[in-house]
């Protein structure tokens, strides 16, 4: 099977962060016109509808969705540009996990988790996934997040179709380091 990793990364850059790189816009709900997207990406690399459908179908984190008639496509989460992808609000489990790089530990212990360039802080449903996410930033460190208590205190949580949990911030008092 051809390796679609590079094209998939480019797709995620366009649909989450930089649609202007190929001269397209996202609507307020994060949707891009599929035809314009295919033409835009096709200017710099071989790309067609079949390749796009294969990326969406095989993506290991279910990063993208089409609308019903497949004329529009969007990233399910992970945006830095302000779009509302209509994530469902959900009651979180008692605990969720956040994996990050050890280099961020001092800052996180002081300030808690902030979304930085993204719209939300991303939390994982299990420790193992959090370790993988953290490893993207070097030597990982994992925090257990007291999401049950946060929900009781009025914080709102969203769950993406791929099982990633999102929330605006996590103050340090709800974090426990889990080595
Ligand atoms: C850290 C991937 C210093 C935070 C993954 C993280 C995820 C702080 C980094 C998704 C901080 C931002 C998101 C503070 C948070 N001081 N550092 N106060 N608060 N940070 O990539 O969570 O493959 O934006 O810990 O699977 O690593 O893209 O977020 O390390 O679901 O689909 O700032 O990206 O999915 O890094 O990853 P990121 P993330 P995809």
Image: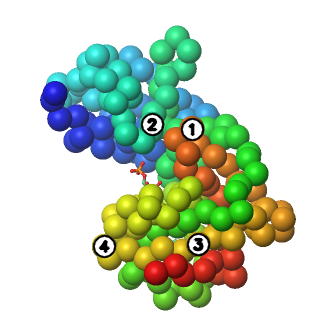
Residue at the spot 75% in from the left edge and 56% down from the top edge: 156
Cα gap from disc 3 to disc 2, whole angstroms: 24 Å
Residue at disc 2, secondary structure: loop
Bin the neighbour count of mark 3 within 10 Å (Cα to Cα): few under 14, some 14-19, many 20 and up: many
Which of the two discs, 2 and 1, labels the residue nearer the N terminus? 2
Find residue 166 and report its horizontal and vertical position in percent: 61, 54
- The residue where tag 3 is placed is 144
Residue 119 visible at all: no
Residue at disc 1, secondary structure: loop
Cα gap from disc 2 to disc 1, whole angstroms: 7 Å
Quick one: quadrant of the N terminus? top left
Q: Quick check: marks 4 and 2 in contact, CB under 8 Å?
A: no
Cα gap from disc 4 to disc 2, whole angstroms: 24 Å
Which of the two discs, 1 and 3, labels the residue nearer the N terminus? 3
Residue at the spot 45% in from the left edge and 36% down from the top edge: 62
- The residue where tag 2 is placed is 62
Bin the neighbour count of mark 4 within 10 Å (Cα to Cα): few under 14, some 14-19, many 20 and up: few
Up-down relation of residue 107 to residue 164 (above or below): below
Q: Quick check: marks 3 and 4 in contact, CB under 8 Å?
A: no
Which mark is nearer the camera, 1 or 3? 3
Cα gap from disc 3 to disc 4, whole angstroms: 19 Å
Residue at the spot 70% in from the left edge and 40% down from the top edge: 88
Which of the two discs, 4 and 1, labels the residue nearer the N terminus? 4
Residue at disc 3, secondary structure: strand
Which of the two discs, 4 and 2, labels the residue nearer the N terminus? 2
As drawn, the label of residue 161 is: 1
Find residue 4 and report its horizontal and vertical position in percent: 22, 34
- The residue where tag 4 is placed is 138
Bin the neighbour count of mark 1 within 10 Å (Cα to Cα): few under 14, some 14-19, many 20 and up: some
The CB of the residue at mark 2 lies under 8 Å from ligand 1: no
Cα gap from disc 1 to disc 3, whole angstroms: 22 Å
Residue 141 visible at all: yes
């Amino acid at each position: 099977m051809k390796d679609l990793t590079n094209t998939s990364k480019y797709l995620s850059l366009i649909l989450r962060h930089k649609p202007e790189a190929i001269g397209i816009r996202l609507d307020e709900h994060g949707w891009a016109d599929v035809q314009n997207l295919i033409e835009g990406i096709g200017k710099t690399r071989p790309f067609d509808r079949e390749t796009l459908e294969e990326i969406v179908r095989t993506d290991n984190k279910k990063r993208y969705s089409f609308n019903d008639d497949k004329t529009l496509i969007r990233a399910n989460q992970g945006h830095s540009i302000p779009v509302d992808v209509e994530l469902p609000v959900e009651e979180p489990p008692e605990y969720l996990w956040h994996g990050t790089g050890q280099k961020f530990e001092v800052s996180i212990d002081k300030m808690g988790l902030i979304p930085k360039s993204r719209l939300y802080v991303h939390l994982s449903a299990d420790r193992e996934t959090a370790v993988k996410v953290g490893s993207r930033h070097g030597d990982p460190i994992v925090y257990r997040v007291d999401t049950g208590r946060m929900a009781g205190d009025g914080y709102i949580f969203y769950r993406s179709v791929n099982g990633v949990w999102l929330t605006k911030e996590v103050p340090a008092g709800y974090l426990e380091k889990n080595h």
